[in-house]
Amino acid sequence: MKQVIGDEEIRALMSAIERRYGLDFTNYEIKSLKRGIFRLMMKRKIKNILELWSIILKDEEFFKDSIDDLMVNLTELFRNPDAWMMIKKILLEEYKSKPNLSIWHAGCSTGEEVYTMAIILNEISMLSKTKALASDLSSQALEKAKNGKYSLIVMQNYLKPFLEFFPDKKMEDFFDYQEFNAMVKPEFKKHVKFTRHNLAQDPMEQKFDIIFCRNVMIYFDETLKLHVLNMFNNSLNDGGYLVIGYYDTMPKSGADIFDIYDNKTRIYKKK
């Protein structure tokens, strides 16, 4: 039987984590945090919230290993092909003639989105002039993203959206296949820098033409969403684009910062 955990218990635990580790989850959406807590407790066979509290605050390695369970990483290769079609159109129309292109994948998770973008850039001969930053809070997810290695079972799931975008291509054009895994070819990695970054707390000093933050803000309350959107606004070059996920919602206050470029594919343009 699933035990009941109150909102105040979750908030108290998040405040304790902030004091202990300096990571602020207090503006994350409470229902998402609660699901993450239940997921973590079931996986680690923890009986109640007090036991979890004790372990998290005493064992730093346990806490670091638990971040992935608290955050669900919603990412796939060529997820929502229509969005990538629109992004390709933007690149060709807006940036084809420009000497360089800068991209930030904020909350990149295990890297599928980063490599989707790299494949598109390669196909339209823009990869060589692109620099990308891929960031995430989870060190484990970042390590997977850097490696660019995905199981053949997962790759099979990615085949359908891939073929929607590239009906005349093969996965082997972009991945080196092994016995159990497929590895992203080196040429689709070298333009990317991976770094750990906490959207809730860490500043961003760089400027970008396009920022991806897909299916990340679903975990944020309205206060944190606005904080992150303001950071994205400050981090975008004039006329830059913000791409959010199909599950994300743009708060009303976001309309003061961004214009809708394409509502269906959740692409916005800096005012």
Image: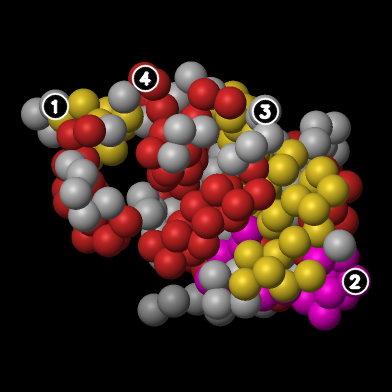
Q: According to the image, label 2 marks what residue?
A: 256
Q: According to the image, label 1 marks what residue?
A: 178
Q: Amino acid at mark 4?
A: Pro
Q: Secondary structure at mark 2?
A: helix
Distance of label 1 from label 3 (alpha carbons): 36 Å
The quarter of the image holding the N terminus is: bottom left
Residue 22: give x, y in percent of width and height: 80, 39
Q: Amino acid at mark 2?
A: Asp
Q: Secondary structure at mark 3?
A: loop
Distance of label 1 from label 2 (alpha carbons): 49 Å
Is residue 122 covered in magenta? Answer: no
Q: Secondary structure at mark 4?
A: helix
The span shown in magenta is 243-258
The structure's colour scheme is: secondary structure
Please rate how many residues cluster around mark 4, counting C-alpha atoms within 10 Å: few if below 14, some from 14 to 19, many from 20: few
Q: Looking at the image, tell me whether mark 1 or mark 3 is earlier in sequence order.
A: 3
Q: Is residue 113 visible?
A: yes
| In front of the other: 96 or 52 | 96
Residue 254 located left or right of residue 189: right
